[in-house]
Amino acid sequence: MTDQAPPINPIAVQLVCIVVLAILASAAVLDFYLALTDRPPLGLRIRTWGRRYPGFLAAVALVFGAMVGHFFLSIPE
């Protein structure tokens, strides 16, 4: 085995960053629109959905936690 880390593709990193920023910006715009039209905000909708489907929400949290753990704990020796 080699002691070198695999090369990082800068285009893939940029694409992931663009997608994440687009999702966050879309959520902010949607929340602003909901606030302007006197509808329940996005956080309340997500909380209501999570209470309706707790098993699915737990699975999403587990996958997200595994991804974060993989990203931060995959330190080359």
Image: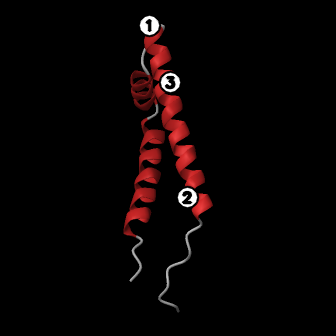
Q: Earlier in the sequence, mark 3 or mark 1?
A: 3
Residue 39 visible in the picture: no
Helix, strand or loop under label 2: helix
Front residue (pair 60, 35) = 35
Q: Amino acid at mark 1?
A: Asp
Q: Residues within 10 Å of mark 3 (few under 14, many from 20)?
A: few
Helix, strand or loop under label 3: helix
Tell me: residue 12, above or below residue 56.
below
Rendering quarter of residue 32:
top left
Front residue (pair 10, 3) = 10
Q: Amino acid at mark 2?
A: Val
Q: Earlier in the sequence, mark 2 or mark 1?
A: 2
Residue at mark 1: 38
Front residue (pair 43, 35) = 35
Front residue (pair 9, 44) = 9
On the image, the x and y values in percent for residue 26 come to 53, 30
Residue 55 visible in the picture: yes
On the image, the x and y values in percent for residue 44 come to 39, 22
Q: Residues within 10 Å of mark 1 (few under 14, many from 20)?
A: few
Tell me: residue 18, above or below residue 74.
above
The residue at the point 41 percent across, 79 percent down is 76
Q: Give the number of the disc on residue 24.
A: none
The residue at the point 58 percent across, 63 percent down is 10
Q: CA separation, marks 3 and 2?
A: 24 Å
The residue at the point 52 percent across, 91 percent down is 2
On the image, the x and y values in percent for residue 43 come to 40, 26
Q: Give the number of the disc on residue 29.
A: 3
Q: Give the number of the disc on residue 13.
A: 2
